[in-house]
Image: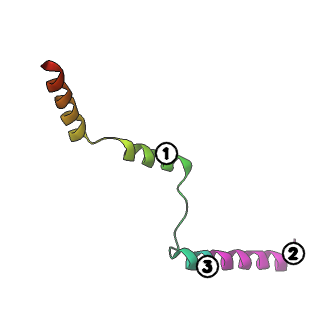
């Protein structure tokens, strides 16, 4: 590949990235890696400690009578 075509490809890629940045308004927007997506979803699904304790107390009171 000649240096001319390589430079043209690089310029085209840079131009397309700039177009995407204008479209989404965030120059650093990249999708999270799969591992980070999974970790974030798992963290969002976890109940808070206070909720777990309150639920356990509620079940204990309900079953102790």
Give the labeled residue for mark 2: 2
The quarter of the displayed image where residue 49 is located? top left
> Could you tell me residue 26's position as x and y percent?
50, 73
Residue sitting at 18 percent across and 36 percent down? 54
Q: Left or right: 44 with respect to 27? A: left
The quarter of the displayed image where residue 39 is located? top left
Give the labeled residue for mark 1: 38
Rendered view: 59 above or below 16: above
Instruction: Tell me which numbered mark, 1 or 2, is placed earlier along the sequence.
Output: 2
> Could you tell me residue 35's position as x and y percent?
52, 46
Residue sitting at 44 percent across and 47 percent down? 41
Instruction: Tell me which numbered mark, 3 or 2, is placed earlier along the sequence.
Output: 2
The main secondary structure of the magenta stretch is: helix
- Camera-nearest label, 1 or 2: 1
Give the labeled residue for mark 3: 18
Instruction: Tell me which numbered mark, 1 or 3, is placed earlier along the sequence.
Output: 3
Residue interval drawn in magenta: 1-18
Quadrant containing the N terminus is: bottom right
Rendered view: 55 above or below 65: below
Question: Gap between marks 1 and 3, in whole Å?
Answer: 29 Å
Neighbor class of circle 2 (other Cα within 10 Å; few <14, some 14-19, many 20+) is few
């Amino acid at each position: 590949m000649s240096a001319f075509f390589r430079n043209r490809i690089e310029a085209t890629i840079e131009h397309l990235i700039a177009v995407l940045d204008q479209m989404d308004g965030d120059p650093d927007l990249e999708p999270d890696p799969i591992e980070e997506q999974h970790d974030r979803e798992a963290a969002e699904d976890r109940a808070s400690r206070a909720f777990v304790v309150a639920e356990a107390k509620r079940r204990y009171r309900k079953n102790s009578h």
